[in-house]
Each structure stands twice: as structure tokens, then as C-alpha cells.
Image (tube, rainbow, N blue to C red):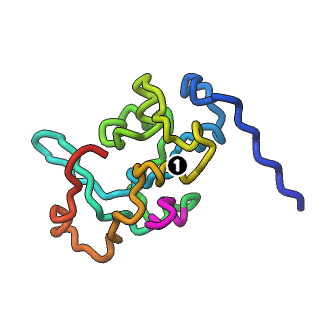
Amino acid sequence: MATKPPTPLRAKFWELPLAKLTPPEWEALCDGCGKCCLNKLEDEETAEVVFTRVACRLLDGETCRCGQYDIRRQFVPECVSLSLKTLPKVAYWLPQTCAYKLLYEGRPLFDWHPLLTNDPESVHTAGQSVRGLTVPEFEVPLEDWEDYVIEGDL
């Protein structure tokens, strides 16, 4: 059985409104930083969100990609499926460098984004990924996550 060739991405599709993107273009916005896969702590009183170095059990710390992306919700039911519908509800906790957040807020991509460089490693070269930063969540008890808070913006 022949496989269907991938749908080509339009030139500079990231400059279009998010609602005009095809599913492959939507997926291609992800820069592969892995930041959204870090466990976060949210202050119930202030709603402030901080990232920890504690990574989702499915994150590959070297590639900064989900090891089971297509079936991730089977293993991590609380994992967010980012879409036009969910984006307004979750944008507040997405990393400052996230393409989905940037475009949702009407801002351009950073110059190191792989769509602009044509190099999937550029996110890592620019120091914008979690490569070498994470510890797996199964190694850190929940009550110790505060010890792994990342200072500053991501």
C-alpha cells in the first residue's frame, strides 16, 4: 500500500492568520524547543506560572520532542492538544518564545525559528530549547518540583 506524500507547506504560511493554516502548517509552527513539555507550577492566588526543569515523562531530553506524540494523551491525559479553540485558554502559560503564542498575539517569529532558518537545529543552537536542562518527572517527587523552578522567562 502506497503512502500519501506529505502535503507541501505554503511559502511564509506563518504570516497568514492562524485560522487559515492547514493541519500540516499548524504542526510545522512548533520549533521543537520542548519548553511546553516542562511541568509547571501555578500560584492559585496570583495565577503566576513558573516552569520547572521537571519534564513530562514522554519528552526526549535530547531531541526535545515527544516520544509518543500521536498517542500522547493515552499516557498523559492532561496533555494539551493545542488548537485554535484551546489556544486562547492556554496561551498565558505557553513559553514567551512559542510560535503559537507569538502569532496568536500578533507578533513575529524569532529569527532563530527553524521555519526562518530552514534548520531544525537552530532552536538548539540559539539556546532556546530544553536540551540538556531537564530531569524526568518519574525521578522527582511532586513535592520537590519547587526545587527545580527555572528562574526568568522561557
* Magenta part of the chain: 58-68
Label 1 sits on residue: 122
Q: Residue at x 42, y 61 (%)?
A: 131
Disc 1 packing (10 Å; few <14; some 14–19; many ≥20): many
* Quadrant assignment, res 148: bottom left
Instruction: Kindly give the residue lying farthest to the right in the view shown.
Output: 1
Left or right: where 47 falls relative to 90: left
Provide residue 106's location: percent of width, then percent of height.
Answer: 44, 22
Per the picture, the main secondary structure of the magenta-coloured stretch is loop
The amino acid beneath tag 1 is Ser
What quarter of the picture does the N terminus occupy? bottom right
Instruction: Kindly give the residue lying farthest to the front in the view shown.
Output: 125
The local secondary structure at tag 1 comes to helix
Instruction: Kindly give the residue lying farthest to the bottom in the view shown.
Output: 139
Q: Residue at x 18, y 40 (%)?
A: 47
Q: Residue at x 66, y 34 (%)?
A: 22
